[in-house]
Amino acid sequence: MYRLELDETGEPAGEPQLFQSSSRADYLWNCSPDGKKVVFSSNRNGPMELFVCDWDGSNLMRLIPRDALLPATGSTYGVEMWRARWSPDGRWIAFAAMVEGQFGIYRVRPEGGMPQRLAEGGDPTWSPDGKWVYFSSTREGKLALLKVPAEGGQIEEAEGRELGQSPDGEWRYLTNAQGTSV
């Protein structure tokens, strides 16, 4: 992975600099709201896991212990983690994982530790106020857009999910329940 400094107009202000190096795949990165940390997915140690490092690539650490999501049965079916997203206040990271063949949405502190399972589903995104985690799930044979309180609790259907916001804050980009942009 590389990083590229931009000038005040958004144009490149130099050459790309090596950010993280691996002989395997490093991708799906997401910057912390304060710009000081980066979380990303990598299979550098085998299965897809989550890693956090400083903005310059230093202080790399595995976010979640390898066996933290495996059930106590000792199963070796495996765990894959990806799509990590920082909460707007930077206090949590929501992510998707496949554990024992089941997709789930989890949250964990940026310092790492034991994650909390929030719901069954995939592709988590935070609400702008950090109170909800939106995600997709297959319910009754069709794709549904759902939301769960950030601390866990009752799952609700969602009208749309925020994908992003324009740099000036004047526009929000959403998907509808069918997953298409609106």
Image (cartoon, rainbow, N blue to C red):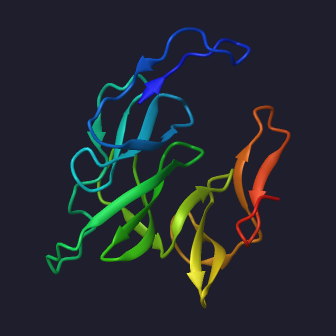
Side (left or right) of 161 relative to 51: right
- Which quadrant of the figure contains the N terminus? top left
**Residue 158 quadrant:** bottom right
Task: Name, please, the residue furthest toward the right.
Answer: 170
Q: Position of residue 15 (x, y in %)?
A: 50, 11
Q: Residue at x 68, y 52 (%)?
A: 129
The front one of 92 and 40 is: 40
Q: Residue at x 82, y 59 (%)?
A: 182
The front one of 111 and 42 is: 42
Q: Residue at x 39, y 64 (%)?
A: 97
Task: Name, please, the residue furthest toward the left.
Answer: 74
| Residue 154 visible somewhere in the drawing | no
Side (left or right) of 120 relative to 69: right
Q: Position of residue 55 (x, y in %)?
A: 44, 26
Q: Position of residue 85 (x, y in %)?
A: 52, 49
The front one of 180 and 95 is: 180
| Residue 109 visible somewhere in the drawing | yes
Residue 47 to residue 79: above or below: above
Task: Name, please, the residue furthest toward the bottom.
Answer: 140
Side (left or right) of 92 relative to 74: right
Residue 178 to residue 22: above or below: below
Residue 52 to residue 174: above or below: above
